[in-house]
């Protein structure tokens, strides 16, 4: 997911920090959620005092969860965050295919249609059951129940989102997967959510679904496809590599969770 919210900004001689509330996750999790959008450590020792302004805001807002993603080389910032109670939970990659208009795959027999109200419950069930590698699932302080609920509501919210498109993926009339996609102004198709029903995994269906989606975007005139995946999901990483995607440098994800 990628959402833009009004950021609070902290700029001192020792620290550059942007942070904000995340209303989408706050609504889903039923407690205040925040995010650090940017942190640049200029002087570690002095930054401890400056960072306390952010911590006061966190406590005043009664925030229970804060997430932060850092470039993989941001080790000074990662160590600083860990000294303030943040914990590393995952590494993510951002696969991209920038040669979309040059590829071709034959018809895969996969049916892709815009989801209807009638499809919602089934697509929510798939999203709530097919993921296990995401940061909410693997963080033992949160757990899979919260992760499953988050994906379920994610699908429901995407159905009514003004810019995102919820897609039902089927084969011979049977629903096999769910996608949430968004067309970007630069001609990129961004995949917010890609999921295959658990009963359909391990049968080669996923590869044909990905191929069908790429051909759909090509026909729509998109020039590239981008997404974000957890480094734990090695099976899907290999799928992306096999389809010609390339990987940008990874990002480290950290969580702060109130005890």
Image (cartoon, rainbow, N blue to C red):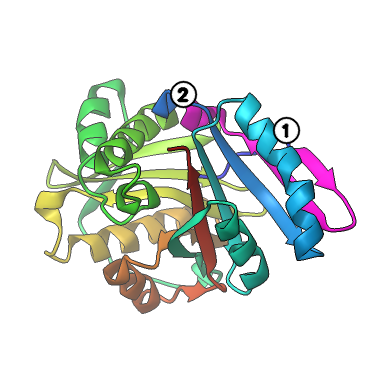
Badge 1 is on which residue? 6
Rendered position, 259 above or below 206 = above
Seen from this angle, which residue lies furthest right? 13
Rendered position, 242 above or below 130 = below
Question: Residue 186 at x, y = what percent?
Answer: 67, 54
Rendered position, 31 above or below 71 = above
Q: Kindly state the secondary structure of the residue where label 2 is placed.
A: helix
Crowdedness near tag 1: few (<14), some (14–19) or many (≥20) residues, C-alpha within 10 Å: few
Q: Residue at x 51, y 64 (%)?
A: 94
| Segment tinted magenta in the rendering | 8-26
Q: Would residue 143 appear left or right of 161 to someone viewing this image?
A: left
Q: Would residue 196 appear left or right of 191 to someone viewing this image?
A: left
User: For residue 181, which numbered disc appears in the image?
Assistant: none
Give me the C-alpha separation between circle 1 and circle 2: 17 Å
Based on the picture, tell me whether residue 130 belongs to the magenta stretch: no
Badge 2 is on which residue? 27
Foreground of the two, 237 or 76: 76
Q: Kindly state the secondary structure of the residue where label 1 is placed.
A: loop
Question: Residue 200 at x, y = what percent?
Answer: 12, 54
């Amino acid at each position: 997911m990628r959402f833009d919210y009004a950021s609070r900004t902290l700029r001192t001689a020792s620290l550059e920090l942007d942070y904000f509330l995340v209303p989408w996750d706050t609504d889903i999790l039923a407690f205040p959620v925040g995010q650090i959008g940017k942190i640049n450590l200029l002087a570690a020792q002095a930054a401890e005092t400056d960072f306390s302004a952010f911590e006061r805001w966190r406590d005043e807002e009664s925030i229970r969860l804060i997430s932060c993603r850092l470039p993989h080389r941001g080790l000074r910032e990662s160590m600083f965050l860990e000294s303030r109670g943040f914990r590393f939970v995952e590494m993510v990659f951002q696969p991209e295919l920038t040669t979309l208009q040059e590829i071709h795959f034959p018809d895969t027999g996969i049916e892709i249609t815009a989801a209807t109200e009638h499809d919602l419950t089934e697509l929510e069930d798939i999203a709530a059951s097919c993921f296990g590698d995401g940061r909410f699932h693997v963080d033992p302080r949160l757990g899979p129940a919260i992760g499953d609920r988050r994906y379920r509501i994610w699908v429901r919210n995407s159905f009514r989102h003004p810019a995102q498109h919820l897609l039902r993926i089927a084969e011979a009339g049977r629903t096999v997967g769910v996608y949430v996609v968004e067309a970007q102004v630069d001609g990129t198709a961004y995949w917010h959510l890609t999921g295959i029903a658990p009963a359909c995994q391990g049968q080669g269906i996923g590869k044909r679904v990905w191929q069908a989606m790429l051909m759909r975007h090509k026909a729509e005139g998109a020039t590239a496809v981008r997404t974000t995946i957890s480094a734990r999901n090695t099976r899907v990483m290999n799928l992306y590599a096999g389809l010609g995607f390339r990987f940008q440098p990874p990002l480290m994800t950290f969580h702060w969770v109130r005890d």
